[in-house]
Amino acid sequence: MRRAALLLLSSLQSKLYGFKAFGAGSVIKPFPVRIDGTKYIAVGKDCFFGSGLTLVAVDEHCGKRHNPVCTIGDRCAFGADFVLSCSKGITIGNNVLASARVFVADSYHGYSDPNRAILDQPMAGEGAICIGDGCFLGLGSVVLPGVTLGRNCVIGANAVVTRSFPDYSVIAGNPARLIKRFDPATSAWISNEPNVKLA
C-alpha cells in the first residue's frame, strides 16, 4: 500500500514539475524553494529530495544562452536545502547520498563589470560536473565547476571541492584535499595524512 501511494505521488509530481524524466518512486518533499528548467533535468527511479530543494537548469541569463544537461541516477537521496544549479552539465550517478545543505553548481555569477550588480552579470566559469556512483556528500559540502568525483568518494562536512578526485577517495577541507583512498590492487586504505588512523 505504501509503495502504491509513493508511486502515485511520484507520478503526480512528474506531471506537476514537467521534468525531462522523473523515474517511478522518486519524490520531492514539500516544500521546494525553487524548481526551474525541468525540461533539461532527468531524474532516475526511487530518488528522494528533502524539503527546501533548489533545482535549477539555466538556459538563458543576462542575454547569454546556455545548453544545460542535468542527469541524476537511480536511488539517490538528497537532504534538506539541497541546491543544484546547472548551466552546462551535471551528472550524478546511482546511489549517491547527500546530507543537508549541499551545494552543487557548474558555473557562477560573473563579476567582471564593477559597475553592475553581480546578480545582473552573465554566468561564468562553466565546467561540467560528474559525481560517480555511490558517493557521499557531507553536511554543508560544496562541489564547484569542472569537478569529477570517482565512484564511492566520501566528501567531508563543509568541504569545498575545487578539483577532481579518483574512485574511493576520502576528501575534506577548504579547498578539499585527499585524506585517504582505497587501493583495489592491495585491498588497503592508503593515508595521505601522516597522523590519520585508517579504518
Image (cartoon, grey):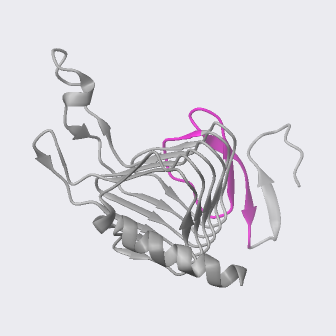
| Residue 147 position within the rendered picture, expressed as x and y whole percent measured from the top left | 46, 52
| Vertical arrangement, residue 183 with respect to residue 35, above or below | below
Front residue of 45 and 32: 32
Kindly give the residue lying farthest to the top in the view shown: 115
| Residue 167 position within the rendered picture, expressed as x and y whole percent measured from the top left | 62, 64
**Quarter the N terminus occupies:** bottom right
For image coordinates 25% across by 39% down, the residue present is 124
Left or right: 87 in relation to 9: left
For image coordinates 49% across by 42% down, the residue present is 162
For image coordinates 71% across by 79% down, the residue present is 2
**Quarter the C terminus occupies:** bottom right
| Vertical arrangement, residue 41 with respect to residue 87, above or below | below
| Residue 165 position within the rendered picture, expressed as x and y whole percent measured from the top left | 56, 54
| Vertical arrangement, residue 98 with respect to residue 183, above or below | above
Front residue of 27 and 124: 27
Left or right: 73 in relation to 157: left
Q: Does residue 57 show up magenta in the picture? A: no
Left or right: 30 in relation to 16: right
| Residue 62 position within the rendered picture, expressed as x and y whole percent measured from the top left | 14, 38
Residue 43 in view, yes or no: no
Q: Does residue 177 show up magenta in the picture? A: yes
Residue 133, by quadrant, is bottom right
Q: How many marks?
A: 0
Residue 27 in view, yes or no: yes
For image coordinates 67% across by 43% down, the residue present is 139
| Magenta residues (range) | 160-184
